Amino acid sequence: MRVLGIDPGSRVTGFGVVDFSGNSLRYEASGCIKPSVAALSDRLKEIFEGVQEIITCHQPDVVAVEQVFMARNAQSALVLGHARGAVLCAAVQAGRSVAEYSALQIKQAVVGRGHAGKEQVQHMIVALLGLAATPPADAADALACAVCHINHYQGGVRLQRGIAGASGGHA
């Protein structure tokens, strides 16, 4: 399974691609989409097109996206929601299923603490994926989102196997 994780932002949108096979994770790619224009509508277009290009290039099976958190500034939360919308539209238009996770769920899955700092997330992503260098914070957050989805997927598979085993294979 190949997962594209996305950490949406109107100024910087991080992405990370992780492959999962058996019980192993493998880093595929990561980076940031940094719109070059000032107008919000133009930035959203660049984010949408950037995500489309990443999907075309890496062919993920699923796109995992960080949910909007309630910021102190309502305007910032609204703009972040627009960036998320551009990401979701690109994923759905490409025919990919979408999974959404809160920042708390992502940090819990990767660090073991829901209130971990960015540096802790970066450190664990380097360790989990065996990276030679620390990715930028936005790319590390996107990779963490992908890893979170894989952890949730694994849990679901184990649960289904347990249910099937408990019912004699008649789940």
Image (tube, rainbow, N blue to C red):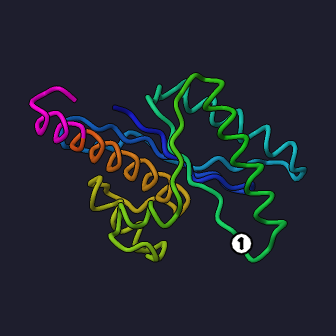
Residue positioned 9% across, 30% down in the render? 168
- Of the residues shown, which amino acid type is indicated by label 1? Ala
Using the image as rendered, state which of residue 28 and residue 168 is in the foreground: 168
What crowding class fits label 1: few (fewer than 14 Cα within 10 Å), some (14-19), or many (20 or more)? few
| Count of marks overlaid on the render | 1
129 is higher (above) or lower (below) than 86: below
Q: Which residues are magenta?
A: 160-171
170 is higher (above) or lower (below) than 70: above
Residue positioned 52% across, 31% down in the render? 97
Give x and y (percent) for residue 23: 18, 43
Q: Is residue 115 magenta?
A: no
In the image, 135: left or right of 109? Answer: right
Q: Is residue 162 magenta?
A: yes
Using the image as rendered, state which of residue 151 and residue 127 is in the foreground: 151
**SS under mark 1:** loop
50 is higher (above) or lower (below) than 151: above
- Which of the image's four quarters has the N terminus? top left
Give x and y (percent) for residue 103: 52, 63
Residue positioned 86% across, 42% down in the render? 42
Give x and y (percent) for residue 114: 43, 72
Residue positioned 56% across, 59% down in the render? 138
Q: Which residue is mark 1?
A: 71
